[in-house]
Amino acid sequence: MLKFILSTLLITSCFTAKADDLMSPVTPVKPASDFTLETPAGENLSLSDFKGKFVLVNFWAYWCSPCIKEFPEMQALYDSSHKDLEIIGIHAGPYNEQAAEFVNKFGITFPIVSDPDTSLKGWDVRALPISYLIDPEGNITHRAIGAKSWDVDEMNALISESANF
């Protein structure tokens, strides 16, 4: 009987998703370092361009298998997210033919920029992929290390939670 109860609890916990399962809170909340990086089209894009919106900043690379795993779901999140959430993908390294193929393969339409020499300051990029949620005031509120399932409902709950900080 005890095995049945423990098995039931384990299975239930695997299917019970909370916003904190998607991203971990950053405490204390800290200002995000602004950046200006180049898009594949040669235009400059800055984090500050999105002030007033929630922004999911994702660091990735075309050779990163966990990045490959999460990109389709991140695009689906972007496609179905409300107008207050933007996503910026920062390619770690020069944007080259392989990176372009990666973006085209997954039909990525959210903004992509490149950090050619991986020297972006003020961001704690320990592994790829790593994502940060920036609130409308420009503060880092949450972080996710590794590939995630970018569930729309979970992300909406996280944004609602962050809006109430």
Image (cartoon, rainbow, N blue to C red):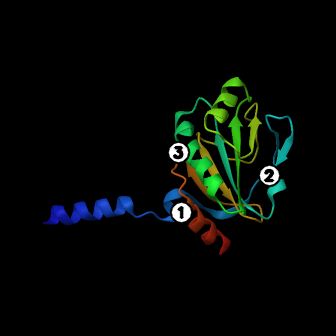
Q: How much space separates mark 2 and mark 3, taking CA atoms?
A: 22 Å
- Which is nearer the N-term, disc 3 or disc 1? 3
| Disc number placed over residue 154 in the picture, else none | 1
Residue shown at the point (64%, 53%) measured from the top left: 79
Foreground mark, 2 or 1? 1
Q: Residue 158 at what x, y percent from top left?
A: 59, 65
Q: Is residue 65 above or below residue 11?
A: above
For the residues marked 3 and 1, what is the alpha-carbon distance in whole angstroms? Answer: 15 Å
N-term mark: 2 or 3: 2
**Mark 1 residue crowding within 10 angstroms, few (<14) / some (14–19) / many (20+):** some
> Horizontally, is 114 left or right of 17 in the view?
right
- For the point 75% across and 65% down, which residue is it? 136
Tell me the residue that label 3 is attached to.
147
What's the mark number on residue 107?
none
Mark 2, residues whose alpha carbon is within 10 Å: few (<14), some, or many (≥20)? some
**To which quarter of the image does residue 116 belong?**
top right
**Callout 3 amino acid:** Ala
Disc 2 marks which residue?
A: 47
Q: Secondary structure at mark 3?
A: loop
Kind of element beneath mark 1: helix
Which residue is at 81% across, 47% downward? 35
